[in-house]
Amino acid sequence: MTPRSEPLLWLQLIAIGVLPLEALLLLLVLAGSDPGPLPGLERLLCWAIGALAPALLLVRRPADVWSLLLLQTPLRGRRELQRRLSRLQATPALALATAGGAALGLPLLWWIDRQAAVASPVSPFGSCPRLVALLLAALLLAVMLWQWQQLVQSLWLLSRKPETVSATPPLSLAELEQQRLCLGLPLLLPEPLKLQEPSIAPPVAVEPEQRTEEAEGAHLDQQVP
């Protein structure tokens, strides 16, 4: 049972390239409106709505690793390997990574909002009110936090050894519904990847006559002074 045969784990790694693009979109959203009289308070409230509150939810109920936010694998159609890997999500290291991602969201939002005026000439959100811009920014922060957790979880699960996965009991359907945040339409049913097993050359059989000749040769070598 190797986790590397699950295609959705590899697909979640797309977040490495998507997260910078979402940060750029966040810049364009905030560039469409002028900051209010208390920009620091606005940024703090935006971060609390878009990162802090979702982080508290995702620490309690981690994002289902078989969910792509809009689509997911049906609960009843999940393989035993997938349910074993779902149980491996429950580890303090992943919860700390989620909390760390939420904490990093505040300085990121602060810096982007301070630099947003540079992108105001090219922003498509030119006449956007400040409140609407902050709500859109909070939504983007929540999506970025979701993808951050999915990225960390996928890297964690891909690094698990097959022996560890085999020794882990699968998560039941009831536990999946209660302990994981499963979002998206249940339409994903990808087939497992067919990984090529390393070929091991069979041992060369030695004929009895050849063994006798080799033994006699070794005996003669020992008799020669």
Image: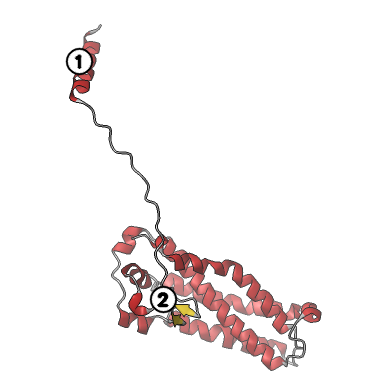
| Image side of residue 135 versus residue 5, left or right | right
Per the model, the C-alpha gap separating discs 1 and 2 is: 66 Å
Disc 1, disc 2: CB below 8 Å? no
7 or 145: which is nearer to us?
7
Task: Tell me which residue sits at (45%, 82%) in the image.
Answer: 185
Position above or below: 203 against 32: above
Sequence-earlier tag: 1 or 2: 2
Left/right placement of residue 202 relative to residue 26 reads: left
Query: Residue drawn at (64%, 84%), measured in percent from left and top?
Result: 137
Residue 44 shows in the view: no
- Residue 78 in picture, x, y percent from top left: 35, 73
**Which residue in the structure is indicated by mark 1?**
216
Residue 92: image quadrant is bottom left
- Quadrant that contains the C terminus: top left
Q: Quadrant of residue 112?
A: bottom right
User: Which residue corresponds to mark 2?
Assistant: 73
Which secondary structure lies at badge 2?
loop
Residue type at the position of mark 2: Thr
Q: Is residue 172 left or right of residue 119?
A: left
Q: Residues within 10 Å of mark 2 (few under 14, many from 20)?
A: many
Amino acid type of disc 1? Answer: Glu
Closer to the camera: disc 1 or disc 2? 2
Tell me the residue at 33%/78% (across/down). Answer: 76
- Quadrant location of the N terminus in the rendered image: bottom left
- Residue 49 in the image, given as x and y percentages of width and height: 57, 88
Counting from the top left corner in percent of width and height, residue 171 is at: 31, 75
Residue at point 67% right, 92% down? 132
Image position of 114 (left or right of 184)? right
Q: Secondary structure at mark 1?
A: helix
